[in-house]
Amino acid sequence: DTEVTQTPKHLVMGMTNKKSLKCEQHMGHRAMYWYKQKAKKPPELMFVYSYEKLSINESVPSRFSPECPNSSLLNLHLHALQPEDSALYLCASSQDWVGTSVFNSPLHFGNGTRLTVT
Amino acid sequence: SQKIEQNSEALNIQEGKTATLTCNYTNYSPAYLQWYRQDPGRGPVFLLLIRENEKEKRKERLKVTFDTTLKQSLFHITASQPADSATYLCALDRTSYGKLTFGQGTILTVHP
């Protein structure tokens, strides 16, 4: 089992709903990430948090709102999503801090939340 | 524009043979390159990292090479087993600041 835990495993929501995805890690990692993966495609970076601060936002629409309450937790708040937002949402963490001159930590991924927007 | 290409969408080999997967990149100068394995319905799992000043890295039956002149990495699985069947992804950091970008992956199937 992965050391990065994501809940829920599956989520079905309507376009007017508000829901949240949760991610937790207890490895002491200081960087956490959200990736989106469509079927038969590679993961695509959405957000990066380092030391609980948002470091990278890959021009993600505002209907996705990340939050990092503490160093172990990462949330992704969802509101007014579209059917094309249906995908596997992956959380990851890494030991190194994004922004160091030699960032080369591997990413530890959770098994994702399978999101379906109806 | 920057591109990462894994030039085989699918690779089928016989058990016991060596699988060789290719990752090519253009318009990057990455300081390192990573390889991940992904099984259906699960998140990617880190396998190996190789830095630009390393020519080769090994871990058990896995070997990775990194040729910054050719802008290519090769990933080898020796004595392949059906359990090695999965999608293998190479990944590069576009900026050295953690923007890890993945290739489209190669689906490896090892037949008994």
Image (cartoon, coloured by chain):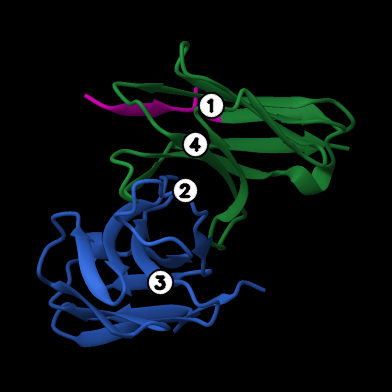
Chain colours: A blue, B green
Q: Residue at x 31, y 68 (%)?
A: A50
Tag of residue A104:
2
Q: Are marks 1 and 2 on the same chain?
A: no
Q: Which residue is mark 3?
A: A30
**Label 3 is placed on what type of residue?**
Arg
Q: Residue at x 53, y 41 (%)?
A: B34
Q: Nearer the viewer, residue A77 or A25?
A: A25
Q: Position of residue A70 (x, y in %)?
A: 34, 87
Write down the quadrant of residue A12 in the picture. bottom left
Q: CA distance from mark 2 to mark 3?
A: 13 Å
**Label 4 is placed on what type of residue?**
Leu
Q: Are marks 2 and 4 on the same chain?
A: no
Label 1: element kind: loop
Q: Are marks 3 and 4 in contact (CB under 8 Å)?
A: no
**Up/down of B48 relative to B28, above or below:** below
Q: Residue at x 59, y 27 (%)?
A: B54
Q: Position of residue A8 (x, y in %)?
A: 44, 84
Q: Which residue is mark 4?
A: B33
Q: Nearer the viewer, residue A58 or B28?
A: B28
Chain bearing tag 1 is: B
Label 3: element kind: loop
Chain bearing tag 4 is: B
Q: Are marks 2 and 4 in contact (CB under 8 Å)?
A: no
Q: CA distance from mark 2 to mark 4?
A: 9 Å
Crowding around mark 4 (Cα neighbors within 10 Å: few <14, some 14 to 19, many 20+) is many
Crowding around mark 1 (Cα neighbors within 10 Å: few <14, some 14 to 19, many 20+) is few
- Which label's residue is closer to the chain start, 2 or 3? 3
